[in-house]
Image (cartoon, rainbow, N blue to C red):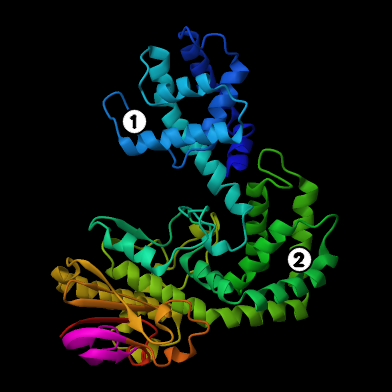
Amino acid sequence: SRAARLEVMSDALHSELSRVSELAYRACSASPTCRDYTRAEVETALAEIFAGYPTYRCYLSEQRRDDIDRARLASAVTAAHDAKPGLDRDLLAYLEGVLAFEIPGDAATELAHATQQVTGAITAKGDEDTLLYRQVRLLARCDVGAELSQWAHSASAFHHVLVNGRSRNLLATSTHDTKRSEDVRARIAVLSELPTEWSAAVMRWRDRAERYWIGTREPVIEYTLWQTLVGAWPLPCERAKTYARKAARESRLRTSWRHPDEAFDNALDHWLEGVYSDPELLAEVAAFAERLRPHGDRNSLAQLLIKLTAPGIPDFYQGTELYDDSLVDPDNRRPVDLALRRDKLRALERASVQDVAGDLSAMKMWTIRRVLGLRRRHPARFAGGYRALDAAGPHAHRVFAFARGDDVVTIVPRLGVHADGYRDTTLEIPSGTWREVLSDQTFSGGTCAIAQLWRALPIALLTNS
């Protein structure tokens, strides 16, 4: 992260860094203890501080003193010293005080305000538009808002986040800014459960496709594209080429928007054309993608039902009411077929849960329609407190469940590749008679088999009858 941010400050955002560095130099010149530092020393110190921001910006001001933001700024200064021990401690301490609005003076105040405009761009460009195209071990986690320092969160940690969720929090799973749609991410996430099979497949494909490279292959971009192909399959070649061009230029490993390498761009196009013209290779890709599909669809439905029932307001990006295979913009800005969605929504009025089972688009819209209908009719049922529920049995860790007050229970799967039908796994349901909202099945409180709860769809929402 530091390297990527420093890189963009030396290139795409150097003019912004120069502007705030000039303000910093003026602020230092007004200080008896810092007036002898050179512009280069000030700029280096400032860049190292910006490279360590743990958030996009701090919202301190002359009037606002926030302990959390102050601690974030202090951590950035500490990180700067740790990364470059030769930096002058007095200069770092002075700049920290300026950025915290603790040092008076017009230049100091102007610098503190200007910094809050610049650090967001540095963090976004460095992390989202550079690092996320380089750190590609699993693309499902390479997206806006990801905590790149942590590989994954436990179920208990996620429960902790949700239990502290506010009623007006926005719950979004796809936006105009995500690198790939919620459904593509859900399928790519399955690769984490098949590491051996995936590794073997990629090695085979890499060896077979090496003949299509012109010049030196680029392993990071190539690995990005194998994940993208299985996550968004069937992906037309032209869409794949557009995505590959953007991924390569954003990563800035061999080409970039400011300094494009046309030879490499053409080599990347040639490699993809070779892959798409190889029937045997494409057949393997398609077969692996099909293996991921049912598990990815289950992930999609799980995150959808959590979004619809956890504390907060569910948000739907254009087109995601159905299965969405979009990649990064401009791919996710394609026109949405609203007439198709209206027709499918009307068709659900005459459908049964058996009619939609197995079709992710139909299951998503069925779930959205039913749960939003319940929320509209009974808003108070979704105002209750959040309480985690623990399953029991050999696959208990593959079940994520919670209650909202005493009236709603959400049960979804996780890590389902090796779930073995959730054999001998149960969930204790509060006493009473419960209706499963998606299938209209009824259940009595007590010990319920997970397989029975998910007999119609691989997710369940119980509410008091």
Report the amino acid beneath label 2. Glu
Q: Is residue 159 left or right of residue 56?
A: left
140 falls in the magenta region? no
Q: Between 192 and 461, which is closer to the camera in this rendering?
A: 192
Q: Mark 2 points at which residue?
A: 273
Q: Provide residue 438's location: percent of width, then percent of height.
A: 29, 84
Q: In this view, does 260 lie above or below 333?
A: above
| Residues drawn in magenta | 427-449
Q: Quadrant of residue 71?
A: top left
* Residue 440 shown in magenta: yes
Residue 343 placement: quadrant: bottom left
Q: Which amino acid does label 1 sit on?
A: Leu
Instruction: Name the side, left or right, on which 448 lies relative to 361.
Output: left
Q: Residue 342 location in percent, x, y?
A: 35, 73
Q: Name the residue under label 1.
A: 60
Compared with 170, 64 (above or below) is above
Q: Is the magenta stretch mostly helix, strand or loop?
A: strand
